[in-house]
Every structure is written in structure tokens, then in C-alpha cells.
Image (cartoon, grey):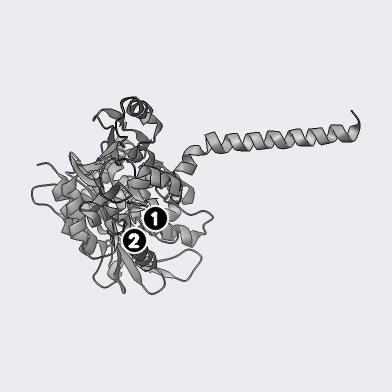
């Protein structure tokens, strides 16, 4: 064989090898992902030939499949649709499995997941109609209802966790939407409804509890800074901090005031505990500079910042910024500059303090059951990290109790129950607008529920509408609904 023919044979062999590898990759490795693409109409048509699994809260279906008499044999129905829209998501012939659990657990609901292989094999042998598996959620319907009703027409989000397990007890994002309008078989109406949702400037399809444009945490982040101070070994609850009425940001001529221009302490030397109680801006800006950005970032990471969580929906990681100058470090001490969080992350901070310093991995699906109600998947509770020592968690808890008893969070008080909380009023933009935050857990001595609430654009001028006045009553309603007395 001469040289040109040998070279041609090598090229042809390489091409056949590449073709074989590409075909194998597509047909085996990528097969599941390709089947689950929202726009894969062949898969969609096939999926409408069998009943899709239900999504259940406390034994009641919030998403179910209903038989029809048209060519698509099943239609997806959502009960209490707006209340649970960001949890369920939608299942549409036109737009596929979108958002929420409909997308995150599509294969299980559709009955195509590997865990259902033997059920599918049995269906072939016995001639039974294939059916998807059902999801039993961790949601407490009372807490979910309290959050949705208390948040009302305001934009924002609310999350509740069981601090001991990480189970998500409530997840509300407003504005919401009706997934029935997208799951309908009236395809023209579906297109119109979806287009209206996409065009809505309030972004109702965004789950503000987990994703979207993250928020500055404001003074709720002072819990992280206080934790970093305690964990450093250089500070206790009684350590005095520098807390004047105004604090000049290092390297600038810009003065940072306390809310309302108030003094944090008659001698401008509030303790760490007093600084948390009254939410002192100047002392925490000073403290952040003393601790340094590395210590604060490390502490934030221990609470879950930077983690790409799946609950099973993807959670946008919260973040503490890099490459800060001294003035920017000071601003991060009060949860400003480029610190960004999800409401879930803020709830995780309170939940960790409530759980003796241990952060539990949050989860939404408790159990997956097949058609015969056999458990094919049970979520294992898992510790994500230790944020602070048990001793320092107890110190932070006491500080948070003082916030509610006699500090900035008195609107969260519940008669006969000790509540631990922290307010936040997070400025954004350039016009003085602010979001209202509140995070809390209760009962403080035996925590059953931890919550975080944000109300977007609660104030345009810092006058009156703060986390303590706007968000705290919403959190209180959730705590009251979630505590078993």
C-alpha cells in the first residue's frame, strides 16, 4: 500500500471513529437530556399518552393529571394554582416542563426515570397503562397559606425551614401566576397567556425565593458579621465596639449614618449584643473593617454562600464580593455594596443559629412513590456545614431574642413565646429605595421553624417602611402558623 492510500485510509478510519463516538454519545450519554428538552415535541406527545404523577402537599394534590376526550389524553390541573405556582411550575404541550418541580423532577413525574424501570417493564408484560410517580412535599400548607396571604399583593418572597432537618415548610414568590393557563389544550390561549407573563415587567415567572436578581441583605447580614466576630475569638457579646452617630467610610469623606441618625449608645461604645439589638450601622461598618473581608467571606461560606444547591430546583448561589477596598468592606458589614443573597439563604442563616450552629441542606421533596404507593425515593436529611460553634450559636440566639423583645423587631412578638429575629432594610439603586427584610425562628428555646421574608421596594425614601414594620408582621404570621403549641 503506497503512502497516499495509507493516509487516506487513516483519515477515513478517523472519520468513522468520530462518527461512531458521536452517535454513541448522542444515543446513550445525552439520551435522557435530549428527551427532557422542553421543546422536544415527540417526547411531549408520547408523555400525554400516560398519566403524569401528582405533586402532593399534606396528602392533597396541588398538581394532577386529568383525563380528556381530545387527542392529548391528559391535561395538567393545578389546585390553589397561584399559591403553589413557583413550587409546581407548569407542564405545557407548547412549552414543555417549565419551572418548579415539573421541570426539576420531570423524568419521575413522567414515569421515564431509571428508578421506575421495573414498573415500566411490568407494565409491558401486564398491559397496564404506564403512569408517573408522585412527589410528596415537605411544605406545611398552613405556613404556605400564612406567607401568601400576609405578603398579599406586594412583590417579594418568603421561605420557611425546619431548622433541624432542612425541610422547606413554605416557599412563596410574588407576583405569582396561574399555571393552568399554560397547561391548557387551548393552544392559542396558551400562547397569549405565556406571552403576557414574559412581557410582564414584574417578572411573575421568576422564583424570587431561589433565583432571579439576588438582593442586598441589608442588616440581616449583621448576623454573619457578628458570627465572624465571635468565631474569631477576639470578641464576645459584651465586647465594646466603635459606634458613633455617623461613621466616615475609610479613605473617603462619606459619612455612614445610623437609621434615623440615632445614637447606638450614649457613649458611642455599644457592645456587640447591643449593636445587633438596635441594628447599629456604624459599629458594624467599623467591625467589618477590623475583621477584614477574608474572615467575613469565610464565615458567609460556612452559612452556605457560594453553594450551588438543588432543592431540587436550582438555587442561585449567594455571594460576598471579592477585591474590596476599605470603604467597600465597611459597607459589606451592613449587608450593602455587592453582598447578594436569596431569601432561602437568609432563612438558612437563622436556621443554622437555631440548630446549634449546623446548616442543614434544604430540600422540598420528602418522598417519591410509584403507582402502587411504594416508596422509591426518600430524601435523607444532610448537614451542609457547621457555621458556628454551639456556644456561639446560643450567643447569637440570645442577641436575636433581644431584637424582638426590645430592639428593632418588636413587631414579630408572639404572646407567650420567645421569638429570635433580625431586621433588615436594604438600600438599592441611587434614589434611596429599599427592600424590607426580616428573618427569625421560634420558639427560641426549642426552634421548630425558621423564616426569611423580603418585601421589594418597601420604601422609596427611608421614611417609616423598614424591615421591622413591613416584613416582621409577615414573618410573625408564618411563625404562628408553623409552631405546634
Q: Which corner quadrant of the image does residue 388 belong to?
A: top left
User: Considering only vertical position in the picture, is 201 above or below 140?
Assistant: below
User: Considering only vertical position in the picture, is 126 above or below 260?
Assistant: above
Q: What's the mark number on residue 190?
A: 2
x and y, in percent, of residue 381 in the image: 31, 33
Q: Residue at x 17, y 55 (%)?
A: 412
Badge 2: residue crowd in 10 Å (few <14, some 14–19, many ≥20): many
Q: Residue at x 39, y 55 (%)?
A: 94
* Residue 454 seen in this snapshot: no
- Count the labels in the image: 2
Spot the residue most to the right.
Answer: 2
- Residue beneath disc 1: 94
Q: Which corner quadrant of the image does residue 424 belong to?
A: bottom left
CB atoms of marks 1 and 2 within 8 Å: yes
x and y, in percent, of residue 473 in the image: 18, 59
x and y, in percent, of residue 275 in the image: 29, 56
Q: Secondary structure at mark 2?
A: helix
- Between 321 and 227, the residue placed more toward the observer is 321
Of the numbered discs 1 and 2, the one sitting upstream in the chain is 1
- Between 399 and 447, the residue placed more toward the observer is 447
- Between 402 and 305, the residue placed more toward the observer is 305
Amino acid at each position: 500500500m503506497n503512502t497516499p492510500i495509507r493516509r487516506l485510509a487513516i483519515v477515513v478510519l478517523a472519520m468513522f471513529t468520530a462518527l461512531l463516538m458521536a452517535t454513541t454519545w448522542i444515543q446513550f450519554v445525552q439520551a435522557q437530556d435530549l428527551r427532557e428538552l422542553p421543546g422536544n415535541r415527540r417526547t411531549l406527545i408520547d408523555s400525554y399518552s400516560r398519566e403524569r404523577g401528582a405533586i402532593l402537599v399534606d396528602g392533597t394534590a396541588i398538581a394532577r393529571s386529568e383525563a380528556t376526550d381530545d387527542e392529548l389524553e391528559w391535561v395538567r390541573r393545578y389546585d390553589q394554582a397561584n399559591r403553589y405556582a413557583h413550587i409546581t411550575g407548569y407542564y405545557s404541550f407548547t412549552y414543555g416542563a417549565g419551572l418548579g418541580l415539573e421541570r426539576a423532577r420531570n423524568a419521575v413525574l413522567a414515569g421515564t426515570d431509571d428508578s421506575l424501570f421495573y414498573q415500566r417493564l411490568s407494565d409491558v408484560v401486564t398491559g397496564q397503562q404506564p403512569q408517573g410517580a408522585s412527589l410528596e412535599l415537605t411544605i406545611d400548607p398552613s405556613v404556605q397559606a400564612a406567607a401568601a396571604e400576609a405578603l398579599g399583593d406586594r412583590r417579594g418572597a418568603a421561605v420557611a425551614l425546619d431548622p433541624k432537618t432542612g425541610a422547606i415548610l413554605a416557599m412563596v414568590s410574588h407576583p405569582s401566576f396561574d399555571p393552568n393557563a399554560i397547561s391548557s389544550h387551548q393552544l392559542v390561549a396558551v400562547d397569549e397567556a405565556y406571552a403576557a407573563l414574559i412581557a410582564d415587567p414584574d417578572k411573575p415567572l421568576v422564583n424570587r425565593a431561589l433565583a432571579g436578581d439576588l438582593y442586598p441583605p441589608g442588616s440581616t447580614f449583621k448576623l454573619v458579621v457578628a458570627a465572624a466576630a465571635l468565631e474569631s475569638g477576639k470578641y464576645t457579646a459584651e465586647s465594646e465596639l466603635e459606634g458613633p452617630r455617623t461613621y466616615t467610610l475609610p479613605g473617603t469623606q462619606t459619612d455612614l449614618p445610623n437609621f434615623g441618625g440615632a445614637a447606638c449608645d450614649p457613649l458611642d461604645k455599644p457592645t456587640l449584643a447591643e449593636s445587633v439589638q438596635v441594628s447599629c450601622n456604624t459599629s458594624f461598618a467599623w467591625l467589618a473593617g477590623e475583621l477584614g473581608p477574608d474572615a467575613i467571606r469565610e464565615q458567609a461560606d460556612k452559612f452556605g454562600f457560594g453553594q450551588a444547591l438543588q432543592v431540587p430546583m436550582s438555587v442561585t448561589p449567594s455571594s460576598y464580593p471579592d477585591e474590596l477596598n476599605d470603604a467597600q468592606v465597611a459597607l459589606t458589614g451592613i449587608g450593602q455594596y455587592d453582598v447578594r443573597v436569596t431569601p432561602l439563604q437568609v432563612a438558612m442563616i437563622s436556621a443554622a443559629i437555631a440548630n446549634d450552629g449546623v446548616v442543614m441542606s434544604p430540600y422540598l421533596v420528602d418522598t417519591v412513590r410509584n403507582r402502587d404507593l411504594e416508596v422509591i425515593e426518600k430524601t435523607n436529611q444532610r448537614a451542609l456545614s457547621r457555621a458556628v460553634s454551639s456556644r456561639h450559636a446560643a450567643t447569637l440566639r440570645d442577641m436575636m431574642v433581644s431584637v424582638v423583645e426590645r430592639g428593632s423587631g418588636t413587631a414579630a412578638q408572639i404572646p407567650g413565646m420567645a421569638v429570635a429575629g433580625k431586621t433588615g432594610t436594604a438600600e438599592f439603586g441611587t434614589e434611596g429605595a429599599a427592600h424590607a427584610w426580616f428573618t427569625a425562628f421560634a420558639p427560641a428555646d426549642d426552634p421548630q421553624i425558621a423564616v426569611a421574608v423580603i418585601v421589594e421596594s418597601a420604601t422609596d425614601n427611608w421614611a417609616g417602611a423598614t424591615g421591622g414594620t413591613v416584613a416582621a408582621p409577615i414573618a410573625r404570621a408564618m411563625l404562628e402558623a408553623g409552631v405546634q403549641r
